[in-house]
Image (spheres, helix red, strand yellow):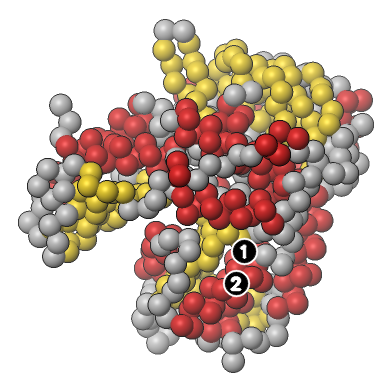
């Protein structure tokens, strides 16, 4: 039987994974009000809102990438942190078994998935003592897609588009704006950033991630940093990157900056980028019973996300086209950037391990005319077979070294993911006759509902997220962002946002 502490931590894990807190929901609602509902960004925000409520209702992961569980625990003097650490690990394993977390802990040398989210370094647990009787446990689930867009600068340095960044507040400003620019849509914008000024390379990143535990609407107690946060939020939203990198008015939902002392020789600016699925929550526990006294962040159920206009949103300037898989070259040659595609039939998931494998091996199924979905789903198995619990897209750019070759080798006609791909894939799409479809990052419940049946699975030895799942879908919607005619929305938005970034080159904070 689990202890009261273990049960409380389990409740925290489930709540964090499945229900966005109120401050995050309000920020997303404000973003929706700032966007035209009939744009790609507006449609994506409507999908995100729907997904948030579906996750809460289903008590299922908001995003299939449930990230690296990172705990910060404050305990009274004398608390047994050894026992607490083990009970936190037990709660993580239980939540994974129950489908509230994806199996995300992988051996860095062998690639083997532990299957329970336990292993050297996972989960991350930071203990601090304080002179209070209560136990404060906070958790953030930060996915790999946004984690990959973290960035660290060593001042002075040359910042792309902004010139020289010196060891002053203006140099820090340039680094933060560039951090937002370089993330584009690959970190599931619109996002939140935590910034750490100072420290060493390790503690700088830790300080940056600590800022993500602040409330979205708080005000920095240091006047210079409060001004900096306000400036960055304003100027980042003038870059035109928008939700999912589709272009739009809202690119950043929150900016929080912390500062620490540093060595004279070192001046680091560390930026922790977090996607719109800003999953962090905390509980205050009774010091004696370890039962939950209160939740640290206001519950999300108080802020409904959907309204009547969601059902009628259409993308301006694009067409909605229904296609049956497998696809033909004629099907995809008729598509243009901006078209909304509704897919029916069978698609196949494929991530890093599968793409690497297919470079030198045959596919287990016929992929001619097929569609590869960059997705690592959350799956549960019972007597009736496999069930999809969450199935949103992963960041596609990781497959850039492989994708063009695999398209041609197997006759694929479409790739689905998020964030877009690079010039090698774009050239292959044009040469071979295929398209890239951008699904809404993080919308794991929205897309899971489109999956009607699991037809089979191959390469389970790669682990559940990296296995090749064969999925029967109906009404699977995505937007053409790279077409078979050499056009790329991602390249266009990158070019446009870089030009806008350069407008902020001149010093502001003297």
Residue sitting at x 75%, y 55%: 247
In this rendering, does residue 409 appear at all? Answer: no
Contact between labelled residues 1 and 2, with CB atoms less than 8 Å apart: yes
For the N terminus, give its image quadrant: top left
In the rendered view, would you say 383 is above or below 370? Answer: above
In this rendering, does residue 496 appear at all? Answer: yes
Label placed on residue 232: 2
Residue located farthest toward the bottom when viewing the structure as drawn: 510
Tally the marks.
2
Residue located farthest toward the left when viewing the structure as drawn: 78
Residue 147 lies, in percent from the top left, at 51, 53
In the rendered view, would you say 387 is above or below 153? Answer: above
- Secondary element under disc 1, as helix, strand or loop, is helix
Label placed on residue 180: 1
Q: Image quarter for residue 395?
A: top right
- How crowded pointer 2 is (Cα within 10 Å; few <14, some 14-19, many 20+) is rated as many
Residue sitting at x 56%, y 73%: 230
Residue 60 lies, in percent from the top left, at 46, 31
Residue sitting at x 78%, y 47%: 39
Q: Is residue 314 left or right of residue 471?
A: right
Front in this rendered view, residue 249 or 259: 249
Q: Image quarter for residue 12?
A: top left
Front in this rendered view, residue 290 or 81: 290
Residue sitting at x 30%, y 32%: 93
Q: Is residue 176 left or right of residue 89?
A: right
- Secondary element under disc 2, as helix, strand or loop, is helix
Label placed on residue 368: none
């Amino acid at each position: 039987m689990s202890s009261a502490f273990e049960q409380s931590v389990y409740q925290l894990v489930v709540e964090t994974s499945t229900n966005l807190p109120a401050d995050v929901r309000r920020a997303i609602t404000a973003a929706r009000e700032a966007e035209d509902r009939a744009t790609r960004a507006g449609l994506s925000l409507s999908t995100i809102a729907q997904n948030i409520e579906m996750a809460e209702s289903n008590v299922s992961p908001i995003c299939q990438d449930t990230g690296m569980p990172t705990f910060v625990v404050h305990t009274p003097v004398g608390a047994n942190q050894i026992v607490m650490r083990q009970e936190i690990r037990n709660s993580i394993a239980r939540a994974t078994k129950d489908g509230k977390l994806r199996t995300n802990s992988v051996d860095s040398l062998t690639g083997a998935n532990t299957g329970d989210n336990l292993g050297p370094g996972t989960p991350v647990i930071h203990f601090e003592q304080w002179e209070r009787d209560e136990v404060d446990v906070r958790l953030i689930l930060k996915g790999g897609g946004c984690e990959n867009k973290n960035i660290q600068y060593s001042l002075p340095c040359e910042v792309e588009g902004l010139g020289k960044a010196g060891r002053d507040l203006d140099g820090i400003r340039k680094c933060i704006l560039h951090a937002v620019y370089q993330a584009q849509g690959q970190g599931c914008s619109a996002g939140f950033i935590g910034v750490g000024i100072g420290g060493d390379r390790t503690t700088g990143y830790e300080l940056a991630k600590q800022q993500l535990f602040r409330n979205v609407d708080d005000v920095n107690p240091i006047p210079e940093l409060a001004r900096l946060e306000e400036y960055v939020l304003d100027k980042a939203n003038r870059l035109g990157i928008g939700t999912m990198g589709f272009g739009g008015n809202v690119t950043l939902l929150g900016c929080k900056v912390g500062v620490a002392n540093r060595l004279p020789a070192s001046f680091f600016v560390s930026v922790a980028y977090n996607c719109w699925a800003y999953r962090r929550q905390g509980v205050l526990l009774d010091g004696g019973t370890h039962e939950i006294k209160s939740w640290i962040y206001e519950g999300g159920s108080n802020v409904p996300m959907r309204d009547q206009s969601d059902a009628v949103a259409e993308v301006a300037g694009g067409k909605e086209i229904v296609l049956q898989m497998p696809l033909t070259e004629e099907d995809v040659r008729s598509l243009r950037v901006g078209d909304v595609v509704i897919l029916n039939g069978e698609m196949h998931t494929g991530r890093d391990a599968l793409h690497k494998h297919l470079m030198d091996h045959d596919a287990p199924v016929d992929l001619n005319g097929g569609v590869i979905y960059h997705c690592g789903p959350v799956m549960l198995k019972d007597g009736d077979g496999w069930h999809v619990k969450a199935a949103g897209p992963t960041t596609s750019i990781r497959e850039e070294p492989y994708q063009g070759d695999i398209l041609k080798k197997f006759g694929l006609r479409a790739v689905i993911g998020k964030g877009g791909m690079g010039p090698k894939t774009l050239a292959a799409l044009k040469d071979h006759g295929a398209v890239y479809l951008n699904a809404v990052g993080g919308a794991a419940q929205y897309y899971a509902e489109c999956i009607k049946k699991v037809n089979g699975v191959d390469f389970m030895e790669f682990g559940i997220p990296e296995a090749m799942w064969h999925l029967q879908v109906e009404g699977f919607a995505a937007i053409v962002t790279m077409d078979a005619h050499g056009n790329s929305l991602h390249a266009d938005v990158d070019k446009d946002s870089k030009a806008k970034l350069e407008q902020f080159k001149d010093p502001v904070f003297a």
